[in-house]
């Protein structure tokens, strides 16, 4: 149903689009996709770069470029972060998690069913990542009490949060952005429960698949948290320093036999120039061919050493493997853990304990290096090693930028490690303690959340107004202290959404017309094809993109193209846009497709290919059920 929608701001004079404008837009898209896929630059910085490039190039005006920050969709996302955090802080989510533990069932299928239904119900009205993080300790407790492998529970937990987010308008940012794209094009957007019929169908298919087939396809993996287990610690990356009196000085990598003695592989070597010896930084006879380059200090070269490379005093060796033997043998006569340069915490003899902690999505350490995060000063612990599943670590230990799901091997006093269990910056593996909950206000939190949903669902308030009113009510009732409110917002997601929105504007008919040009080009290749086959193509493209880029950015990019295709075919675009929203949350093929996957990836000790093995059939099932159901729920001719 098409309706007239007035412009948000008075129209600005625009220059006539030229062919070069389309080329520039597609170049920006290609560059953004390459950066998203490489993960060498943070996604929020890529989005900001896209926004500034569009403004500077004149493809959008200054007002249009920054319009995303005033978008109702972005405002709603910010408010939902706070509402979700209030439910966590008041213990509402913990009470739900305790329901599974109280059942006492040991049947794997029933455990998968209950876990996925619970996390799905929670993620329908709160952030997917928060729902996964809350139930993560419960999954470990279930595995311990029932004797089931925890790897059989963690992946269903993550997948369930993504599926549950598909059932409501506020379940996940892509749903809001899909509705916003329709409104920007002059159509009626989706309401609160318009996603429910298709979302429930997709959830049912996903839950049944994981119960009867998916859980059987999940390989058995030993989780992190067992320090004597080779499987658990085999992929840690640590850094050691070769001291002046070390027995390894003068030996080659092959002669050191670190693999045979400690089970550790030398991944890289960091070596400072010897300027006092007149060494020329550009003449490096010890530097092998292959990947190498200067470290951030500009005075140190990082390289992959040959077996014949001789070890010198002062070298920093980046080792990968199980560091347990190294922890027993390290010392000035052999190798010293370079955690000391991260301001090691002084601990009396016999008091030191080891712990493994995963970085939470909202941690203050995310995006910071280990050195900048100041673990010694802030938490009273020393970081000994980092475990980042799926990607090679090439930076110095102190320069690694932390990401959600990274697992740290830390050393500290029992008191310091116990404090981590109550710190929202970390997910402490195999612990059930949480930060203190203000359960006295749980009823207020539930009431505020229900009123917010009712106000938005009935049309009494626009979803953005209802969410902001709910956020204010959470503060007024004490469910969310004002001093903590802004800390619970994932500002990276906000900047990704707001930064990518101008790209959709630049592609419309009033600017470059790139979306319609691309739509007509696609239709030219598939002339006369049924709309359902076009919907299948759109969903397939979206599924592929969401594996390597933010699902929110994916919707901002694909939704305008889907709408343009629908308009060119003379069909209603709602089914196409709903398909884009569903496909954007079908991030089951890789662990980097969504942060919920990253959380379980690290602590579950999964391999990269495990997600494709389990998520591949699920993706096909979800796509098939969507192609059958969406044209029924949202007819092409309306």
Image (cartoon, grey):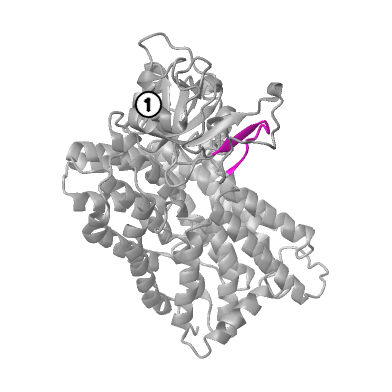
> How busy is the neighbourhood of tag 1: few (under 14 within 10 Å), some, or many (20 plus)?
many
Q: Is residue 540 left or right of residue 293?
A: left
Please name the residue shown 48% across and 80% down the image. Answer: 534
* Residue 418 higher or lower than 559, as above or below: above
Asked if residue 293 lies in the magenta stretch, the reply is: yes
Based on the displayed image, in which of its 4 quarters is residue 234 positioned? top left
Report x, y in % for residue 110: 20, 51
Asked if residue 248 lies in the magenta stretch, the reply is: no
Q: How many marks?
A: 1
Report x, y in % for residue 559: 56, 69
Is there any visible trace of residue 171 in the rendered image? yes
**Residue at the bottom extreme?**
528
Q: Quadrant of the N terminus?
A: bottom right
Is there any visible trace of residue 438 in the rendered image? no
Q: Is residue 388 left or right of residue 244?
A: left
Report x, y in % for residue 264: 39, 33
* Residue 254 higher or lower than 339, as above or below: below
* Residue 189 higher or lower than 418, as above or below: below
Q: Which residue is mark 1?
A: 355
Which is more toward the observer, 507 or 294? 294
Magenta residues (range): 292-303
Please name the residue shown 40% across and 59% down the image. Answer: 589
Which is more toward the observer, 387 or 484? 387
Circle 1 sits in a helix, a strand or a loop, which is it? strand
Please name the residue shown 78% across and 68% down the image. Answer: 11
Report x, y in % for residue 244: 53, 16
């Amino acid at each position: 149903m098409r309706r007239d929608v007035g412009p948000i701001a008075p129209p600005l004079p625009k220059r006539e689009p030229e062919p070069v404008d389309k080329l520039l837009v597609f170049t920006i898209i290609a560059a953004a996709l390459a950066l998203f896929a490489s993960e060498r630059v943070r996604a929020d910085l890529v989005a900001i770069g896209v926004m500034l490039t569009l403004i500077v190039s004149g493809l959008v005006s200054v007002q249009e470029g920054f319009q995303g920050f005033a978008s109702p969709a972005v405002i709603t996302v910010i408010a939902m972060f706070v509402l979700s955090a209030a439910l966590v802080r008041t213990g509402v989510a913990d009470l739900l998690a305790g329901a599974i533990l109280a059942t006492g069932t040991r049947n794997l299928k029933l455990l998968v069913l209950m876990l996925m239904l619970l996390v799905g119900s929670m993620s329908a009205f709160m952030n997917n990542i928060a729902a996964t993080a809350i139930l993560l300790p419960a999954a470990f407790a279930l595995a311990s009490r029932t004797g089931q492998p925890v790897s059989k529970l963690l992946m269903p937990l993550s997948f369930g949060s993504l599926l549950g987010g598909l059932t409501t308008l506020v379940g996940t940012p892509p749903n809001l952005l899909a509705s916003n794209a329709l409104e920007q094009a002059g159509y009626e957007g989706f309401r609160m429960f318009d996603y429910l019929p298709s979302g429930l169908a997709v959830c049912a298919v996903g839950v049944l698949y994981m119960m009867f087939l998916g859980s059987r396809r999940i390989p058995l993996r030993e989780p992190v948290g067992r320090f004597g287990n080779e499987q658990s610690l085999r992929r840690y990356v640590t850094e050691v320093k070769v001291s002046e009196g070390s027995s390894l000085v003068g030996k080659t990598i092959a002669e050191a036999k670190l693999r045979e003695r400690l089970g550790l592989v030398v991944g890289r070597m960091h070596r400072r120039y010897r300027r006092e010896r007149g060494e020329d930084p550009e003449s490096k006879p010890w530097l092998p061919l292959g990947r190498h380059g200067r470290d951030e200090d500009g005075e140190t070269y990082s390289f992959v050493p040959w077996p014949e490379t001789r070890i010198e005093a002062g070298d920093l060796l980046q080792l990968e493997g199980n560091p347990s033997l190294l922890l027993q043998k390290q010392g000035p006569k052999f190798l010293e853990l370079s955690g000391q340069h991260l301001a090691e915490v002084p601990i009396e003899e016999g008091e030191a304990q080891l712990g493994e902690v995963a970085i939470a999505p909202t941690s203050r350490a995310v995006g910071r290096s280990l050195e900048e995060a100041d673990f010694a000063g802030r938490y009273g612990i020393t970081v000994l090693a980092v475990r980042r599943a799926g990607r090679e670590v090439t930076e110095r230990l102190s320069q690694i930028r932390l990401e959600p799901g990274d697992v740290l091997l830390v050393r500290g006093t029992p008191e310091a490690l116990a404090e981590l269990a109550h710190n929202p910056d970390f997910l402490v593996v195999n612990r059930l303690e949480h930060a203190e909950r203000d359960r006295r206000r749980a009823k207020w939190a539930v009431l505020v959340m229900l009123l917010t949903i009712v106000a938005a669902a009935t049309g009494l308030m626009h979803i953005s107004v209802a969410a902001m009113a709910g956020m204010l009510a959470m503060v007024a009732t004490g469910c969310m202290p004002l001093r903590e409110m802004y800390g619970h917002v994932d500002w990276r997601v906000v900047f990704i959404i707001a930064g990518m929105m101008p790209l959709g504007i630049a592609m419309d008919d009033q600017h470059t017309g790139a979306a319609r040009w691309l739509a007509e080009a696609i239709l030219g290749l598939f002339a006369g094809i049924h709309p359902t086959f076009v919907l299948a193509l759109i969903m397939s493209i979206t599924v592929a993109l969401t594996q390597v880029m933010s699902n929110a950015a994916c919707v901002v990019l694909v939704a305008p193209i889907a709408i343009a295709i629908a308009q060119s075919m003379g069909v209603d675009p709602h089914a196409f846009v709903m398909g884009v929203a569903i496909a954007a949350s079908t991030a089951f093929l890789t662990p980097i497709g969504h942060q919920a996957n990253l959380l379980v990836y690290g602590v579950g000790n999964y391999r990269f290919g495990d997600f494709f093995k389990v998520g591949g059939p699920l993706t096909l099932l979800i796509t098939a059920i969507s192609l059958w159901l969406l044209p029924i729920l949202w007819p092409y001719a309306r």
